[in-house]
Amino acid sequence: MASRNEQLSRADQVRARRKIEPAHRKPIPQPPKSTTREAESASRVISRHTYPGMAREARSKAKPQRRIYLPTDTPGSEIRLPAVPEVKLGWRLLSAFLVILLGIGIYMLNFSDSFEISTLNLSGAQRIPAEEILDKLDLSGKPIISVIPSEIEAQILAEFPDIKSVTVRVELPANLTISIQERIPAITWYVDGEATTWVDEEGFTFPIRGEATIPLKVMANGDPPRPLGYVDPASEPAEKAETPILPTPSVDPQFVASVLKLRGYIPTGTALLYDPENGLGWTDAQGWQVYLGTDVSQIDVKLAEYQQIVTALLERNLQPGLISVEYIHAPYYRLE
């Protein structure tokens, strides 16, 4: 047998061995079973394609650089300097800078000497000095930012009844301008021969200050009549004292109108008289006191009655101490 196999070629030997040995085939590999996690991972596919929008975004992330060219003396030629990165400030950085700047400004307005009130620009005042207003307000050394014009105006009107209106303007760095309008006195009120107060046409009383052309004097033995519903500021509760109390007319405006109306009826240079019981009057040429009451709406009728009474008294050679025509239908005279 050995000799026979030796006589066969190698190819014949391989074919003979295949006929004798059973064929052993390699198993076909099967793909592994996919799991749920692998399915989820497979659904997230990352694309590696480049789109135009992605290209622009990539270019925008790159820091832009600014090219600088310098001209030369040779026409058509220039020198290019190295590119300089262009720096852009973001909104957050800009906002932080503004907040810091604003904080510094507020600090300086509150604590810097340059913004402290030291002078007062006063206009419209003829009798009231600026120093007195500044002392009353106590604003010297305070920061200008703490001044509220409306509160200053109310305080001035409450402290100075002889001021009719006021306007306060605040200007940086530390200018305080006050424009006022003073009340014009119409009556000088005397009590027991001493001047006590001025009265304007609206019935406001205020202290005598400086000089003024007074058209009329009233010699009285008491206070002038108050308007209806008048409340004395001194009687206000203590809890209301913290807020400025604006002045109100303390004299009946109708009474003031009656006083001013008598200017054209009494002799020039004659002072008016006022008595709480008899009203307004004057001393006539005979030295007699004549009273018309506080209502002078019918002054012509009252003056006619007065002339008739004077004629009758002179005919009888009587010397009255007082003549009253306050009531038209009940005039009377009183002998000394």
Image: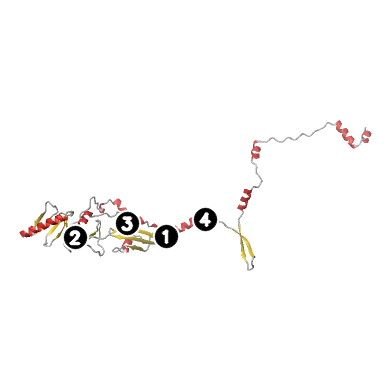
For disc 2, the marked residue is 264
Label located before the other in sequence (3 or 2): 3
When the figure is inspected, residue 216 is found, relative to residue 230, above or below; the finding is below
Check disc 4 and report its element: helix, strand or loop.
Answer: helix
Label located before the other in sequence (3 or 1): 1
Who is closer to the viewer here, 113 or 59?
A: 59
Quadrant of the drawing holding the N terminus: top right
For disc 3, the marked residue is 155
Q: Where does the image place residue 77, in percent across and percent down from the top left?
A: 64, 65
Label located before the other in sequence (3 or 4): 4
Q: Where does the image place residue 119, in percent across and percent down from the top left?
A: 36, 64
Residues under labels 3 and 2: Cα distance? 39 Å
Amino acid type of the residue tagged 3 in the rendering? Gln
For disc 1, the marked residue is 111
Label located before the other in sequence (4 or 2): 4
Amino acid type of the residue tagged 1 in the rendering? Phe
Label located before the other in sequence (2 or 1): 1
Check disc 1 and report its element: helix, strand or loop.
Answer: helix
Residue furthest to the bottom:
73
For this view, does 208 lie left or right of residue 301?
right
Residues under labels 2 and 1: Cα distance? 61 Å
Amino acid type of the residue tagged 2 in the rendering? Gly
For disc 4, the marked residue is 94
Residues under labels 3 and 4: Cα distance? 43 Å
For this view, does 95 lie left or right of residue 133?
right
Check disc 3 and report its element: helix, strand or loop.
Answer: helix
Query: How many neighbours does mark 3 have within 10 angstroms: few (below 14), some (14-19), or many (20 or more)?
Result: some
Contact, CB < 8 Å: mark 3 with mark 1? no
Q: Nearer the viewer, mark 2 or mark 1?
A: 2
